[in-house]
Image: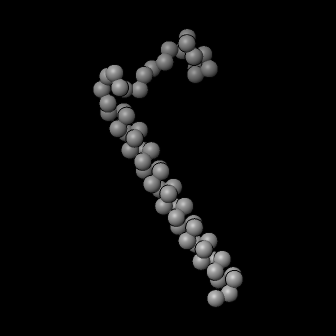
Amino acid sequence: MSEEVKFKSVLIKSLKILGIIYCITAVSFAAIIYFANTLDRPYHKRQIPAEITPWLK
């Protein structure tokens, strides 16, 4: 095999692996956010008053 063919096969394999990692990360993030929104108190996402954090307005 020539160097160019080896490079292309390695590049394709690397992009596939990175794509799989990206998909797993996105799905995991969405699942964690969904699960966090379904939790009851006191484990729900807390609301921070605007007076305490003016930069969040």
Please determine whether, in this image, residue 3 is positioned above or below residue 19: below
- Seen as rendered, the residue at the extreme left is 40
Residue 31 location in percent, x, y?
38, 44
**Horizontal side of residue 43 vs 2, given as left or right:** left
The quadrant of the picture occupied by the N terminus is bottom right
Residue at 55 percent across and 71 percent down: it is: 13
> In this rendering, would 40 be left or right of 3?
left
Drawn side of residue 39 relative to residue 46, left or right: left
Give coordinates of residue 45: x percent, y percent.
Answer: 41, 26
For this orientation, the residue located farthest to the top is 51
Q: Residue at x 41, y 38 (%)?
A: 33
Looking at the rendered image, the quarter that the C terminus falls into is: top right
The correct choice, above or below, for 2 with respect to 15 in the image is below
Display coloring: one colour
Nearer the observer, 11 or 30: 11
Q: Which of the 4 quarters of the picture holds residue 53?
A: top right
Observer-nearest of 57 and 45: 45
- Seen at 42% across and 50% down, the residue is 27
Q: How many marks?
A: 0
Residue at x 50% of width, y 14% of height: 49
In the displayed structure, would residue 37 be above or below residue 54? below
Position of residue 35 in the picture relative to residue 11 (left or right): left
Residue occupying the far bottom of the picture: 1
Residue projecting furthest to the right: 3
Q: Give coordinates of residue 54: x percent, y percent.
A: 60, 16
